[in-house]
Image (cartoon, grey):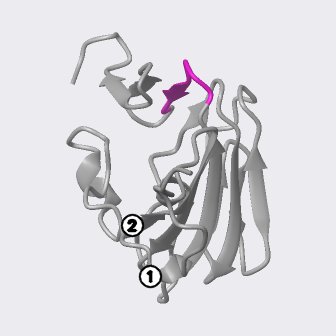
Amino acid sequence: MTARRHPVSARADQVPTRLKASSYPEPFASRMQGRMKRPLGDLFGLKNFGVNLTTLLPGAVSALRHQHLRQDEFVYILEGEPTLVTNEGEMLLGPGMCAGFAAGNGDAHMLINRSDLSCMYLEIGDRTPGDLATYPDDDLVARATEHGAWQFTHKDGTPY
C-alpha cells in the first residue's frame, strides 16, 4: 500500500492562494492586481484539468482578454457580479450563472469586477498539451510547454 500524496477533501476557501499572482510577463503581470487564485485541482494532483477558486477584488480582472486553441474553459459564479467581456460585448453575471468557451472557437474573453464588492467563481480548464493562447487586445501570445508552463512571446515571435 502506498501513502497518499494528496488529500481527499478540503475546504476550498482555506486552500492557500498562489504565491505568484500571474505567470504573465511585465507589463501584463501587474494588471492582475486584486486577483487571487486558490489552485484546487493542483491540491488533489489532478493532471487532466485544472480548477481554481478565484476571487476578484473591486476593479480586478480575471485575465487579459484571451482565447485558447486547444483548451476548453468554464466559469461558475459563486458570489458577486463580474462583467463577462467577449467578442460579442459585455454581460453582467451573477451567482449561479456560468459561461463556457470551447477550444478554438475564437471567442476571446475575460471577467472584470466593476462592482464595489468582491466576486468569487470557479474556473475550470483542461490541460491539453500544445495549447496556444492569443490576446487580441495585447501584444502577447502564450504557448504551453511540454511541462505545462506558459512561454510568452510578442505577436511577432520575439520572446519577453
Three-letter code for the amino acid on which mark 2 is drawn: Arg
- Which residue occupies 27% across, 49% down? 29
Residue ID for mark 1: 14
- Which residue occupies 33% across, 58% down? 32
Q: Which of these two is toward me, 4 or 15? A: 4
- Which residue occupies 31% across, 21% down? 153
Report x, y in % for residue 126: 65, 39
SS at mark 1?
Answer: helix
Q: Which of these two is toward me, 140 or 15? A: 15
Three-letter code for the amino acid on which mark 1 is drawn: Gln
Q: Is residue 30 above or below residue 134?
A: below
Q: Which of these two is toward me, 154 or 3? A: 3
Report x, y in % for residue 59: 41, 73
**Mark 2: few, some, or many residues within 10 Å (few <14, many ≥20)?**
many
Can residue 139 be seen?
no
Q: Is residue 83 left or right of residue 24?
A: right
Residue ID for mark 2: 35
- Stretch in magenta: 128-135
**Mark 1: few, some, or many residues within 10 Å (few <14, many ≥20)?**
few
The image quadrant that residue 105 belongs to is: top right
- Which residue occupies 70% across, 38% down? 72
Q: Is residue 156 above or below residue 88?
A: above
